[in-house]
Amino acid sequence: MRDAANAQVLQNAEIQNIIKIMGLNLNSDYSKAELLLNLRYGSIMIMTDQDHDGSHIKGLIINFLHFFWPKLLRHNGFLKEFVTPIIKATHGVN
């Protein structure tokens, strides 16, 4: 993502949705806690599968936020992760 042009990243539909849903502003640095009050939600929770694809998606989201709003991630509790358990289900009794 860091190698892509800013315009290319910002034209992505999923990125546009995240920006719109959260109420993020490209001109804000979110260094002060008061600026978080301008957002529509108080935090972002990443919920992805615990496989390679899910890990990759999680990394892309964190990288995106860190690139455009690095100070946003410094606020405790702003970025959250829901860790889904990995289980093995079997049928019958062993």
Image (cartoon, rainbow, N blue to C red):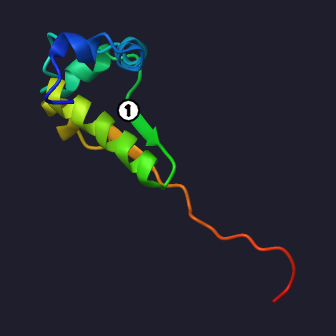
Give the percent coordinates (x, y) of residue 79. 33, 39
Q: Is residue 65 left or right of residue 12?
A: left
Q: Quadrant of residue 70?
A: top left
Q: Depth check: 51 or 86 in front?
A: 51
Q: Is residue 8 left or right of residue 39?
A: left
Q: Which residue is mark 1?
A: 43
Direction bottom: furthest residue: 94
In which quadrant of the rendered image does the C terminus lie?
bottom right
Q: Is residue 53 left or right of residue 77?
A: right
Give the percent coordinates (x, y) of residue 35. 21, 19
Q: Quadrant of residue 75?
A: top left
Direction right: furthest residue: 92
Q: Quadrant of residue 80?
A: top left
Residue at (48, 44) in percent of width and height: 48
In which quadrant of the rendered image does the N terminus lie?
top left
Question: Is disc 1 surrounded by few (<14), some (14 to 19) or many (20+) residues within 10 Å?
Answer: some
Q: How many numbered dots are placed on residues in this image?
A: 1
> Could you tell me if residue 77 is visible in this image?
yes
- Residue flagged by tag 1: what amino acid is it? Ser
Q: Is residue 36 left or right of residue 91?
A: left
Question: Can you say whether 1 is above or below 38 in the image?
Answer: below
Q: Secondary structure at mark 1?
A: loop
Question: Can you say whether 13 is above or below 65 in the image?
Answer: above
> Could you tell me if residue 69 is visible in this image?
no
Give the percent coordinates (x, y) of residue 9. 25, 18
Q: Depth check: 43 or 52 in front?
A: 52
